[in-house]
Amino acid sequence: MAPEITRIETTEFSYPLTDVGTDGGYNLAYDPGATTERRLFAIKVLTDEGVTGEFVGGNSPAFAQIHEVADHLVGANPLRRERHWSEIKRALRKYDRMGIGPLDIALWDLAGEYYDAPIHELLGTYRERLPAYASTYHADDEGGLDSPEAYADFAEECLEMGYGGFKIHGWGGSDDRRNVGREVETVHAVGERVGDEMDLMIDPACEYETFADALRVGRACDEQNYFWYEDPYRDGGISQHAHRKLCEKIRTPLLQTEHVRGLESHTDFIDNDATDFVRADPEYDAGITGAMKIAHVAEGHGLDVEVHSPGPAQRHCIAAMRNANYYEMALVHPDCGNTEPPVYEGDYADELDSIDDDGTVPVPDGPGLGVDYDWEFIEDHAEGGRTYE
């Protein structure tokens, strides 16, 4: 007999980010003495055979969508992931479908526990160590990443640690700080310092307000031979036309689709020549099931897929992808810790110093996601949640 889902539990909790504030807008930035409270969710899918699937991550809008579909999964066979994925995709057709991600990842974790195998093995292992790049916080005015030279210094530090790539999240936030000239200076400063030894990337996170801004920075990237240029436009990363036009004017490859939801939209972005690399994220893109579909579509078009953000699910996905180059270690800074939640027991971590001397991180090899969560911490910091049974 197959297992049957008997209960689904969700918990909202918070944790502090020390010495982290904002850059005057919506970006996280170094701010000594400040504390920012970050909220995440945790989910458990329990079965009548005692096998449980777990995942920590996601935000309030995603979990609001889970409330729309969780009742329908109670009583179902949790191993029928593809069927559940298809049905939930239809059920959430009026939304962005980000609620699929946490549920799907938890179901993959449950399957790994059931079969006593890591997720990457169920997917088909391609590798078990992942090259990482350092992905920075946004610029600050507090003595951290506060100048082009500071970014270059940090890039050099990351190179010495073993990182093979370095990505700039630069100048944004309030109008008086959003300075494209300083962004261009940073592109050059980092390129001139370490460009011959590292792959360099820049992610404006949709800060630029004009085509001219995007073009100026793109041409600076050309001059420094950047590896990719990501999400420049204020459009939010969704205009195929705009990014195709930018591709025509610069040499640096574009990395798009972080903010495009759905397999079909990713495919259309590729088919319309609006990106060179393809972005996927198991949390954003309908789970491990959705992220792997995107990777295979990209592979069929001869393109690479780069997985967004760090985490156990991301590691398992990259481990099963041939056409991926890097693991994103984010967000990192010379003076404050990463944004990862303090919920992992054991030696799993996504911090600046989590790489080995070769600049790689391991893929968890335990059943499912291969990590143990500190449920006592989650419950002690709980701010709400729901149970479906």
Image: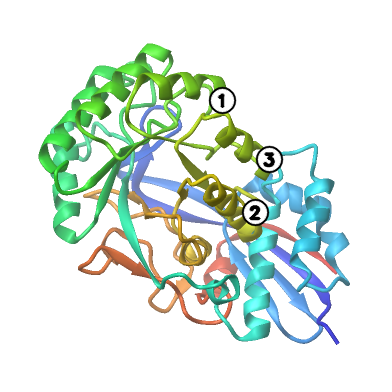
Secondary structure of the residue carrying tag 1 is helix
Q: Nearer the viewer, mark 3 or mark 2?
A: 3
Which residue does the numbered mark 3 point to in the structure image? 264
* Quadrant containing the C terminus in the rendered view: bottom right
- Is residue 283 in view? no
SS at circle 3: helix
The CA distance from mark 1 to mark 2 is: 21 Å
Residue 339 higher or lower than 361, as above or below: above
Kind of residue indicated by mark 3: Glu
| Badge 1: residue crowd in 10 Å (few <14, some 14–19, many ≥20) | many
The span from disc 3 to disc 1 (Cα, nearest Å) is 13 Å
Q: Position of residue 380 (x, y in %)?
A: 56, 67
In the picture of the structure, the residue carrying the numbered disc 1 is 240
The image position of residue 304, as x and y in percent, is: 45, 48
- Residue 348 visible in the displayed image: yes
Asked whether the residues under the numbered discs 1 and 2 touch, taking CB atoms below 8 Å apart as contact, a structural biologist would say no
Of mark 3 and mark 2, the one earlier in the sequence is 3
Which is nearer the N-term, disc 1 or disc 2?
1
Sequence-wise, which precedes: disc 3 or disc 1? Answer: 1
Please tell me which residue is depicted at 80% across the width and 41% down the height of the picture.
Answer: 93
Quadrant location of residue 75?
bottom right
Name the quarter where the N terminus is drawn.
bottom right
Residue on which disc 2 sits? 290
Q: Residue at x 53, y 63 (%)?
A: 313
**Amino acid at dot 2:** Gly
